[in-house]
Image (tube, rainbow, N blue to C red):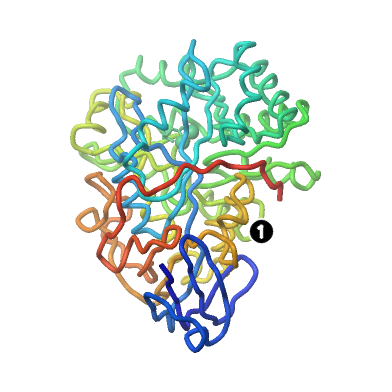
Amino acid sequence: MKTLIVGGQIVTATDTYVADILIEGERVALIGRDLASTVQADRTVDATGKYVLPGGIDVHTHLELASWGTVSADDFFTGHVAAAFGGTTCHIDFANQARGHSLREALDAWHARAEGKAVIDYGFHVSITDPRPEVLEEMAQLPTWGVTSVKLFLAYKGVYQLSDGDFFRVCRRAAELGLLPIVHAENGDVIDILVREALARGETAPIWHAHTRPPQAEAEATARAIWLAEMAGAPVYIVHLTQRDALAAVANARARGRPVYAETCVQYLFFTAEELARPDFEGAKWVCSPPFRTREDCEALWQGLARGELAVVSTDHCPFNFAGQKDLGRDRFDHIPNGVPAIEDRLIMLYHAGVHEGRLSLHRFVELTSTAPAKLFGLYPRKGTVAVGSDADVVIWNPSARHVRSARTHHMNVDYNLWEGWEVVGRPEQVFSRGRLIVDGDRFLGTPGSGQYLQRTAPTLL
Ligand code: URP
Ligand code: ZN
Ligand code: ZN
């Protein structure tokens, strides 16, 4: 199958130019002017007046995650459909090691979830929760299984949290093996005490989720993760960074020349803890960890993106329905499933508030949503750019289309949208996954099972 995309403005992290693209099979075969005069294609798509972008890469998602006594509402089919409608053609999910089990068992369990359902390409980080000596040994296998990043938790005491000693041991082993440690940085011990004390006082409302996870718990754990990784000789990537002091810790380390990276998630650029105080338990829709912070923190994150202190914008997509799932915590905030839906909104909201409203350049938008994720997580240049030889994961983006975000029209399998009723400018119109047109306007054309597992290579440290 040959597809010719003509007349679009190709945008990469570094270049913008008008050219035609020939897709042959799964790859970009040619880029040039006036290709229609020399190439016979099976299908021609007119992209005049549109941007042609590399497909988005979301490196932080939780599809079909069993947690808080329920399961996140998007699986590897519905989540992929939603991702595709939002211009995302690749994601990396988390295979969580269960205590007493091996890393291979975790990966097998997550491969089974994706089997036969995947529409876009996907990879896995492995979360190490039980680093017994044999598990540290087993880490050597991860690159052969296509996994080049390991997730470590300094939060969720009694579930996923590692001691500082275990964290250090895993980082040192990761450094030996060329793996990238990625970290949920909040002080789980302090949070555990604050939650117990709040419950003992009878504080049960969603806002207490934010009150019991203070910004200092994130700032402290971020700084600690950075120093522990440095002592272990490892690079480190902080996931879902939400606030200014944690950002300062990352910026300081980078100023010292350390290989320290951080992502924020698109929702943290928009919302504050005030959302959790909404009446009638509606605040539960915004319960996620770390919690939403203040308007000043949102502003600091935008500046961190523009200044290059933050490397990536992801989502931490972990959707739970308001009715029937968030409900589990009606009587106590610590039983509210943690997580929000955003996989479909990421590019749209970042483009609208970032590029359209003038906070980010178009190149930086592509870098944050596709190129840097591809480089840091061992997918570049197969993914993350529009170039001859790269996978034809291509998004045709209409920069002036106005539309309204709503749970009534989104494709995520969840009964609310964080940006309900917001009018935004810019959206994907056509989405190609390895040369297959999977979204055309409002129509979904993908096939379950066509998404491929990605064998990732070593991280390219930026
Ligand atoms: O609230 C969140 N973030 N839920 C997903 C698990 C995690 O910590 O990333
Ligand atoms: Zn987390
Ligand atoms: Zn997460």
**Viewer-nearest residue: 89 or 417:** 89
| Three-letter amino acid code at the position of disc 1 | Arg
Residue 235 coordinates in the image, percent (x, y): 71, 37
In which image quadrant can residue 421 be found? bottom left
Residue 68 coordinates in the image, percent (x, y): 33, 24
- Above or below 430: residue 446: above
**Viewer-nearest residue: 210 or 169:** 169
**Viewer-nearest residue: 129 or 326:** 129
Tag 1 residue: 307
Q: Which quadrant does ligand 1 occupy?
A: top left
The residue located at (52%, 17%) in the rendering is 102
Q: Is residue 293 left or right of residue 69?
A: right
Residue 314 coordinates in the image, percent (x, y): 49, 48
- Above or below 189: residue 373: below
In which image quadrant can residue 76 be found? top left
**Viewer-nearest residue: 188 or 259:** 259
In which image quadrant can residue 169 be found? top right
The residue located at (36%, 68%) in the rendering is 430
- Above or below 85: residue 415: above
Residue 222 coordinates in the image, percent (x, y): 63, 34
Residue reaching furthest right? 256
Count of residue discs: 1
Crowd tier of the residue under label 1, counting other residues whose Cα lies within 10 Å: few below 14, some 14–19, many 20 or above: few
Q: Is mark 1 within 8 Å of ligand 2?
A: no
User: Which secondary structure lies at badge 1?
Assistant: helix
The residue located at (70%, 23%) in the rendering is 173
Q: Is residue 385 left or right of residue 116?
A: right
